[in-house]
Image: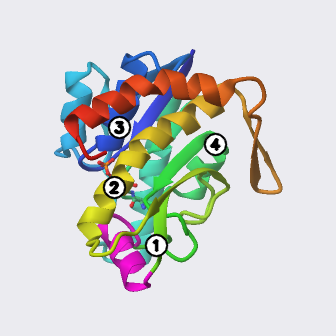
């Protein structure tokens, strides 16, 4: 059984989807053991509480002003060190950033190298990712660039922002008349399906990173089995969202 920690700062719909996959026994050999947040008042904390998952708040730096760059770095390092200690104390094997509004520094990135994933709500992470690119800003940039498609990307976290080795992507077409909100909404539905798939691939030891590229071992009936198990989740999404 691998123990997963999710880092999140806001609404927490990706966290909820991962918890649902575990609860519905779609995710195998994965226990959602911890939520780490840098915002004690974030709605995601409530989701953890309702699902009896321990939630830990560590003072972060997102949205805060600091007197100097050094002070900001110091506060960030402090967060990272506390997070590493928390992960160790809780015997965490894998970390999933899900709407976590803070860049992790080198110490935690290396301590959990290729054991930390992130989700970004775009297909082209080079053009529509990086510092300051989060939430609706991403979708607004995709629309103003006139892209025909977008999507979501799950990648391992490295020292760059959104630039680590890509694990999985889901493509979502941009539709005529799309707003940042409508595009975000359709992509989110795919995010909720794709993140757990990436987690299961990792836990099943199907991912190898070579020269910063991820190769996936799809041998056997892995994907068929996954799709069959995930049907129940997709059905539950469609009940909430008939157009999904
Ligand atoms: C998600 O769309 C996620 O991809 C995005 O924030 C949203 C969080 O939603 N992350 C980023 O933009 C990171 N660069 P959630 O709190 O409902 O999971």
- Quadrant placement of the N terminus: top right
Relative image position of residue 145 (x, y in whole percent): 44, 85
Relative image position of residue 103 (x, y in whole percent): 46, 60
Residue 112: within the magenta? no
Relative image position of residue 200 (x, y in whole percent): 58, 29
Circle count? 4
Say which residue appears at 43% left-offset and 83% top-offset.
Answer: 146
Cα–Cα span, label 3 and label 2 = 17 Å
Q: Nearer the viewer, residue 196 or 173?
A: 173
Residue linked to disc 3: 15
Crowding around mark 3 (Cα neighbors within 10 Å: few <14, some 14 to 19, many 20+) is many
Label 4 vs label 2, nearer the camera:
2
Sequence-first disc among 4 and 1: 4
Relative image position of residue 116 (x, y in whole percent): 57, 43
Cα–Cα span, label 1 and label 3 = 22 Å
Cα–Cα span, label 2 and label 1 = 23 Å
Say which residue appears at 16% left-offset and 45% top-offset.
Answer: 41
Disc on res. 111? 4
Residue linked to disc 1: 131
Label 3 vs label 2, nearer the camera:
2
Q: Which residues are magenta?
A: 133-146
Up-down: is 87 above or below 195? Answer: above
| Circles 1 and 3: CB atoms closer than 8 Å | no
Disc on res. 186? 2
- Residue 73 placement, left or right of 41: right
């Amino acid at each position: 059984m691998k123990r997963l920690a999710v880092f999140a700062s806001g609404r927490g719909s990706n966290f909820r989807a991962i918890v649902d996959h575990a609860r519905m026994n779609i995710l195998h050999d994965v226990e959602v053991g911890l939520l780490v947040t840098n915002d004690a008042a974030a709605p995601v904390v409530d989701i953890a509480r309702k699902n009896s998952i321990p939630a830990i708040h560590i003072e972060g730096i997102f949205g805060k002003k600091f007197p100097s760059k050094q002070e900001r770095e110091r506060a960030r390092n402090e967060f990272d060190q506390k997070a590493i200690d928390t992960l160790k104390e809780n015997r965490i094997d894998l970390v999933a950033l899900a709407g976590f509004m803070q860049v992790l520094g080198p110490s935690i990135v290396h301590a959990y190298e290729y054991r930390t994933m992130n989700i970004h709500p775009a297909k082209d992470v080079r053009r529509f990712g990086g510092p300051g690119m989060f939430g609706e800003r991403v979708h607004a940039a995709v629309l103003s660039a006139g892209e025909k498609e977008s999507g979501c990307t799950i990648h391992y976290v490295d020292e760059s922002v959104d630039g680590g080795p890509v694990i999985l992507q889901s493509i979502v077409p941009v539709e005529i008349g799309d707003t940042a909100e409508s595009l975000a909404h359709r992509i989110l539905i795919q995010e909720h399906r794709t993140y757990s798939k990436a987690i299961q691939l990792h836990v099943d030891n199907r991912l190898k990173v070579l020269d910063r590229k991820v190769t996936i071992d799809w041998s056997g009936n892995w994907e068929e089995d996954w799709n069959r198990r995930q049907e129940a989740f997709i059905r539950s999404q469609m009940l909430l969202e008939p157009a999904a």
